[in-house]
Image (cartoon, rainbow, N blue to C red):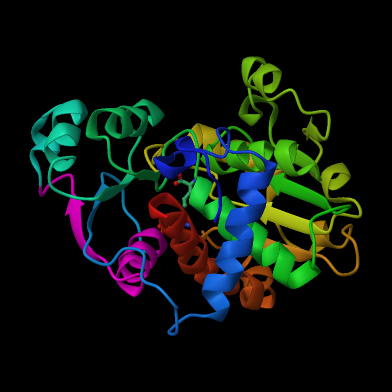
Amino acid sequence: MVSASPFFQMQFLSIEESNATHLESLIHLAAEMKSTRGAHSNLPLAGQTWAIIFTKASTRTRVSFEVGIRELGGNVMFLSKNDIQLGRGEPIKDTARVLGRMVHGAVIRTFAQQDVVDFASYSGIPTINALTDEEHPCQILADLLTIREKLDTWAGKKIVFIGDGDNNMSRSWMWAAKYLGFELVVAAPASCLPQKDFMDRLDASNVTLTIDPVEAVKNADVINTDVWLSMGQEGQGEKEALFGDYQVNEKLLSHCADKHIVLHCLPAYREKEITESVLEAHADTIFQQAENRLHAQKAVLAALVE
Ligand code: CP
Ligand code: NVA
């Protein structure tokens, strides 16, 4: 049982809306899902059909949700925006009210966080955020599971997010740090650090911001990076040009703690945010992190329908 809260049984839209107990229980359940894969004692989605509605590209999230829903006994349909009237301008609230009467749950990847909030509210069915411009909550669960597997715990560790400090991944990481209490340093060019209103809302003294990548990674246990230009920002060459000093390369990693790990949510752009040699040296961790999407999301799905 992950949480008795009716709220957590209806939606998983952000880490911001979560809390320490909820996150800990989801990670615990994810580890259990991983160890019992292929032999689950119950199939919580049996008899259900879930919709996966994506308006952005995806490899890991789409495949892990499709596999995960089936492994939990459910049926699944993938709907890209081009397949449905959403792509021709039908409002999200109408799409939600139709699907809410036909399917049992929805997994949505899109741009505006408000769209997943509206979908959840108008559909009345369990709704999962599979990435918006605001957050990528499922990814952070997989990342936390990977840290626990590789380093035993995040407690007392120094975790760094280096790259675009004002994107979905960095925001979800900052909320996770607030609730779980580990030290998080976000290193980014000044114009790519989170805004003051976000930091005020976050209100977490264990999260610090810096423009100094070397200072950020000093004695760090976990180095986490992501693309410099998120989906929807393609072609923003001026922004990309700001990140030269923030590449995760061997020289930067020489400042980390001896037993550091490197995380990347993928897809990775080699020789931009991470070098080929660093990615390949840490491929075991990075692809374990990718696999953990499956186990973490099965935990989210099971928790929503328990
Ligand atoms: N990390 C991640 O969400 O990957 P996809 O965009 O391939 O789903
Ligand atoms: N910040 C990236 C994450 C991709 C998984 C993006 O939104 O494109």
Please state if 81 lies on the left or on the right of 305 as rendered: left
Q: Residue at x 67, y 37 (%)?
A: 174
Q: Identify the image quadrant of the C terminus.
A: bottom left
Q: Residue placed at 57% from the left, 63% from the top?
A: 29
- Looking at the figure, which quarter contains the N terminus? bottom right
Residue 218 % position (x, y)? 90, 51
Q: Nearer the viewer, residue 172 or 30?
A: 30
Q: Quadrant of residue 157?
A: bottom right
Residue 39: image quadrant is bottom left
Residue 270 in percent (x, y) is at 55, 63
x and y percent of residue 165 in the render? 64, 36
Q: What residue do we see at 68% from left, 54% from top?
A: 224
Is residue 210 depicted above or below 182 in this figure?
above
Name which quarter of the figure residue 88 lies in. top left
Instruction: Say whether residue 270 is left or right of residue 107.
Output: right
**Vertical side of 13 occupied by 277: above or below:** below
In-front residue for pair 238/106: 106
Name which residue lies at 35% across and 74% down.
71
Tell which of 51 and 33 is nearer to you. Answer: 33
Viewer can see residue 170 = yes
Q: Does 71 lie within the magenta span?
A: yes
Q: Seen in the image, is 48 located left or right of residue 245? A: left
In the rendering, at what x and y percent does residue 7 appear? Answer: 46, 35
Check residue 247 for magenta coloring: no
Apparent side of residue 225 relative to residue 134 in the rendered image (left or right): right
- How many tags in the picture? 0
State the residue lying farthest toward the bottom. Answer: 39
Residue 264 visible, this angle: no
Q: Where are the magenta residues, as a range?
A: 60-83
